[in-house]
Image: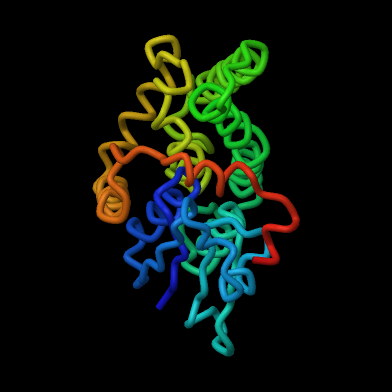
């Protein structure tokens, strides 16, 4: 059994997508990031960066004590190795998958996240910041579109954790100021993943916890966007 510390954000969806694909038994432990659950001492023991998702695997490979993992990319890698699925075993396939997983972790996710912040949540609309991150998001969409021009999935012919990592960050393309019609290969890939039964189930789990139409309150924004080192001492 896996305890999944989760909130329905792009990084949270990555993990439910994997778990639903594999059928691994898991229990969602909601971490309401707008209410500050991520600063709870028990959660910080698992996720010292005070970010979700995180997991505790009570049946790790080889047995022994439970294993906890934080950071969505590390969780996907751990689960893929545990299950022997969605990560090629051969050297070249593994390298292709991992480099695109890290591309998402270091590029698409952070840049789209800043895009969301300055265009949707910042109390002051700063044109330079909005343009900077909308344009960089656009560039990254172009990189992914080019990658998908001659292959079905990001790492090749097989669906992998690289796809699971990137897909949730494309879901909000309209809010990011992006038109999928400008990226035909990305659009084809996006719709294929959206229609996978496991993806549908994963996003339904999120809707049960926090409906997508629910707006972020001003108090939520203070918790999310006002964090400093002192926040860890709550």
Is residue 143 visible in the rendered image? The answer is: no
Residue 137 pos. (x, y %)? 57, 21
In the image, residue 113 above or below residue 77:
above
Query: Which residue: 51% across, 68% down?
Result: 55
Residue 58 pos. (x, y %)? 48, 82
Left or right: 49 as drawn, with respect to 158: right
The quarter of the image holding the N terminus is bottom left
The quarter of the image holding the C terminus is bottom right
Left or right: 194 as drawn, with respect to 163: left
Residue 153 placement: quadrant: top left
Work out which residue is located at the far front of the displayed protein and give it: 219
- Which one is in front, 93 or 134? 134
Query: Which residue: 53% across, 43% down?
Result: 162
Work out which residue is located at the far bottom of the displayed protein and give it: 64
- Which one is in front, 214 or 132? 214
Query: Which residue: 56% across, 44% down?
Result: 222
Query: Which residue: 67% across, 12% down?
Result: 128
Colour scheme: rainbow
Work out which residue is located at the far right of the displayed protein and give it: 229
Left or right: 53 as drawn, with respect to 175: right
In the image, residue 153 above or below residue 149:
below
Count how many numbered circles sit on residues in the image.
0
In the image, residue 4 above or below residue 99:
below
Residue 133 pos. (x, y %)? 62, 20
Is residue 225 visible in the rendered image? The answer is: yes
Residue 44 pos. (x, y %)? 63, 69
């Amino acid at each position: 059994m896996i305890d999944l510390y989760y909130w329905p954000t792009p990084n949270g969806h990555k993990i439910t997508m994997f778990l639903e694909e594999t059928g691994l038994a898991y229990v969602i432990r909601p971490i309401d990031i707008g209410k500050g659950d991520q600063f709870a001492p028990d959660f910080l023991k698992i996720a010292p960066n005070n970010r979700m998702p995180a997991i505790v695997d009570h049946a790790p490979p080889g047995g022994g004590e439970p294993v906890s993992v934080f950071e969505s990319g590390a969780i996907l890698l751990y689960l893929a190795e545990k299950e022997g699925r969605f990560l090629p075993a051969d050297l070249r396939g593994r390298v292709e998958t991992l480099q695109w997983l890290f591309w998402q972790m270091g590029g698409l996710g952070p840049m789209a996240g800043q895009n969301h912040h300055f265009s949707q949540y910042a109390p002051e609309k700063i044109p330079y910041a909005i343009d900077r991150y909308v344009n960089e998001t656009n560039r990254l969409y172009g990189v992914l579109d080019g990658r998908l021009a001659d292959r079905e999935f990001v790492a090749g012919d097989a669906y992998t954790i690289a796809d699971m990592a990137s897909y949730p960050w494309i879901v909000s393309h309209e809010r990011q100021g992006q038109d999928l019609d400008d990226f035909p290969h990305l659009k084809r890939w996006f719709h294929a993943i959206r229609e996978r039964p496991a993806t549908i189930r994963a996003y339904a789990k999120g809707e049960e916890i926090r409906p997508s139409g629910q707006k972020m309150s001003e108090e939520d924004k203070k918790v999310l966007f006002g964090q400093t080192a002192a926040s860890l001492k709550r």
